[in-house]
Image (cartoon, coloured by chain):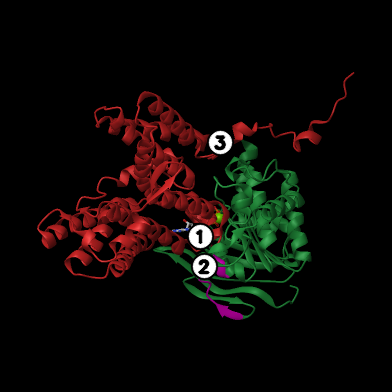
Amino acid sequence: MTTLTPVRSRTGDERLAVTHPVKRLLRRPEMGAFIAALVIFGYFSVSTAAFLTPAGAATWLYSASLFGIMAVAVAMLMIGGEFDLSAGAMTGTTGLLVGAFTTQWGMNLWLAMLLALLIALAVGAVNGLLVVKTGIPSFIVTLATFFILQGVNLAGTKLLTGQVAIQGMTLVPGFEAGKVIFGGVIPVFGLDLKVSVFWWIGLTAVTSWVLLRTRYGNWIFAIGGQLQSAMQTGIPVRRTRIGLFLGTAAAGWLVGMLSLFDVATVQATTGIGQEFIYIICAVVGGCLLTGGYGSAIGAALGALIYGMILQGIVFAQWDNNWLKAFLGGMLLLAVLVNLSVRRQAGVRA
Amino acid sequence: MTGAAPILEVRGIGKVYGSVIALSDISISVGAGEVVCVLGDNGAGKSTLLKVLAGVHPHTSGEVLLDGRAIRFAGPRNALDAGIATVYQDLAIVPLMPVWRNFFLGAELSSGVGPFSRLRVAEMRAITLAQLGRMGIDLRDVNQPIGTLSGGERQSVAIARAIHFGARVVILDEPTSALGVKQAGVVLRYVAQARDRGLGVVFVTHNPHHAYPVGDRFLVLNRGASLGEFDKAGIGIEELTRLMAGGAELETLAREIERG
Ligand SMILES: Nc1ncnc2c1ncn2[C@@H]1O[C@H](COP(=O)(O)OP(=O)(O)OP(=O)(O)O)[C@@H](O)[C@H]1O
Ligand SMILES: [Mg+2]
């Protein structure tokens, strides 16, 4: 005997195909990166001896953390529909500024750090203002800023020190205290994790929360998704967009400090060439290059993938140059996956 | 005319985009419980007029009055805060965002102060579902990206949003253009309901058959200028249609088509 139950009473709506919870999970923007991270983790764990050792894991987590902090900020900016090519050079600029202020001019360390932060924010504000006021694509504006910073970093360092790096940070009063916050090591389950890993995790959590659970997050998605609509619904578009550029600049400062206190030396070339890696991490993590879609957790996973490959290749004793080829392949794959996501998530014409 | 003091009024308004004169010397007002229809052909300047009313574009001449006082909206937020909500012709939606986020875009409900305020997600979902239900739109899921809805469904969401947030005046730019017969009827009934609740409605349409039944007054635009403002008592639907289409042209067209 069969009893027929109306479809409606079970599913709520008969037009809605019942989606399996797993399938729903798979639709999340960061899912592709999550699966890729698992595969890469598995591969290097099995194929190299060093990858899974506490020292090995601490190494790739540290690499991932520095890229991850930037990738998360860049992802938030990209969701808002913009790029920041000056983000890499900014990590160098801020470190060099603190180095120059303290070792060359004897400025108080904390004051020097604050000043470097303010300068970074000023550069971010200029980027943002130019984009918002003139409508010039951020790709061009920040490309210009990138070259300016790169030139200033190199020429300024040479001018001041006669060398291509600033050294001697360990002699600066307060360095040890700063190292606790920005360069310390915290043991967790036998792993000696650099403190930057915690900054990375914390920042990812905060950014994720901002994006998904606050009004600002809503505004960022709207601005990147359809600027015109965002304006028409009365969102404070200018303020929000400029804020995003301040975000990447501040993240650049944070990473600048993290590397400064880690090695006590700043190369004038620090960060140059990394701006695209941040973007790649964000895209691998599910950000659309066209804006309006993506996730902070995805970008953090993208950076994790990058960190694992970067160190995994070393542990496997491969030629380092394979990294670039890998990266290009990952990017292409991610863009293709994202494209299909966008089609499915359905943007009808 | 009801004689009620107008809530929103424009006097001798003009709008120039660079060298394009999109509007010149238009006057119109809407009071509580009144439906004003703006009619005109493509490119007549209807959307431009509404954008001035909604605070999107500043006008280049004339004045805008809110409750009798001259005002210059700095942006759509100003107008929204004054209780003026708009359904734009392009709907002002973000295709990749869920329906409920679109519904509350720019007016999100949140609790807590400053940086710690968080969205009241469950409440917003429930309100969205309820408001859409009231419009006869029975959505599968308010979490789906709005870009996946049909054109008519998207239009309905935008209308429901304006009705929900428009405390005093609701402005609708061709809200019935993509709708089926039933939904168009629902929208017209909505317009009537909003009027009965004491809202002022500005209703833009191409279709005199939609405008005539609900409208109290009709403003006909042609090439950025006014062809006149008419009370319902002063004009019939045939005459309105003829006026919109540029008079005799339509009759010639009808004859040509019949012969063919
Ligand atoms: N941002 C703009 N820049 C320049 N010209 C514009 C702009 N917006 C509108 N126009 C011009 O102003 C005129 C009126 O446009 P508008 O959109 O108001 O027409 P409409 O009456 O709403 O037409 P439709 O019925 O097709 O929606 C058109 O000729 C248009 O080209
Ligand atoms: Mg129009």
**Residue extending furthest front?**
A190
Which residue bears the numbered disc 1?
A231
Crowding around mark 2 (Cα neighbors within 10 Å: few <14, some 14 to 19, many 20+) is many
Tag 3, which secondary structure? loop
Chain seen in green = B
Q: Chain of mark 1?
A: A
The percent position of residue A109, horizontal first and vertical second, equals 28, 67
Residue type, numbered disc 1:
Met
> Which residue does the numbered mark 2 point to in the structure image?
B75
Checking the image for residue A27, the label placed there is: 3
For the residue pair B69 and A232, the one nearer the viewer reads as A232
Please give the name of the residue rendered at 53% of the width and 53% of the height, measured from the top-left corner.
A209
> Which element is circle 1 on?
helix
Tag 3, which chain? Answer: A
Magenta segment boundaries in residue numbering: B69-78
- Measure the alpha-carbon separation of dots 1 and 2: 8 Å
Instruction: Give the residue type that dot 3 points to.
Output: Arg
Question: Which chain is red in the picture?
Answer: A
Q: Which mark is residue B246?
A: none
Identified by mark 2, the residue type is: Gly
